[in-house]
Amino acid sequence: MPKNTHLQVNPSLQNKKPLIGDWLVIAVSIVAVIVLFQQFWSFAPASQLKIRQGSTVVGIYDLSQTRELHIKGPIGESIIVINNGQARFKQSPCPNQYCVHQGWLSHAGQVAICLPNQVSLQLLDAKNTYDSLNY
């Protein structure tokens, strides 16, 4: 077994400064991230709510109304509230209540899912936007 197991750094590489090509790659990368973020991430307000129970679409509802919906799932009933351009799980029979803690959804592409009860909410806009369900 060798006695000297320490990693040695080549002294000629220790104080190497970035070249103009390095700065060019960094600048192009930053611009690309900003452009892609604006292109694929939408902060537009949603106009509709799509509710699924399992693989079945229960309905598409207008967010301009005030409404409380009761959706039956495999473990019980989920209560969904639509109010003033927003939607949320008000109550669900799942043990951890992650879907309820998700809170109000208001932007196109946002999603809340109750996995144990197989109920999902997805906010829609007139324009198809990027979201995690379609990726």
Image (cartoon, rainbow, N blue to C red):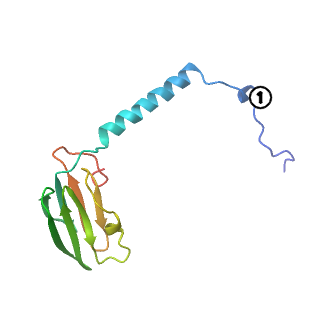
| In the image, farthest residue toward the bottom | 75
Tell me which residue sits at (31%, 41%) in the image: 40
Depth order, front residue of 1/52: 52
Instruction: Specify few, some or many for label 1: CA neighbours under 10 Å numbering under 14, 14-19, or 20 or more.
Output: few
Please identify the quarter of the rendering in which residue 22 is found. Answer: top right
Depth order, front residue of 23/86: 86
**Residue 83: % across, % down:** 19, 61
Tell me which residue sits at (31%, 43%) in the image: 41
**Residue 44: % across, % down:** 24, 45
Judging by the rendered image, the residue that carries numbered circle 1 is 11
Depth order, front residue of 93/8: 93
Q: Secondary structure at mark 1?
A: helix
**As drawn, 116 above or below 125:** below
**Residue 11: % across, % down:** 77, 28
Looking at the image, residue 100 sits to the left or right of residue 15; the answer is left
Tell me which residue sits at (38%, 74%) in the image: 96
Tell me, yes or no, if residue 53 can be seen here. Answer: no
Tell me, yes or no, if residue 65 can be seen here. Answer: yes
Tell me which residue sits at (26%, 70%) in the image: 90
Please identify the quarter of the rendering in which residue 75 is found. Answer: bottom left
Looking at the image, residue 30 sits to the left or right of residue 135; the answer is right
Please identify the quarter of the rendering in which residue 49 is found. Answer: bottom left
Looking at the image, residue 66 sits to the left or right of residue 23; the answer is left
**Residue 74: % across, % down:** 24, 78
Amino acid on which the number 1 mark rests in the picture? Pro
| In the image, farthest residue toward the top | 20
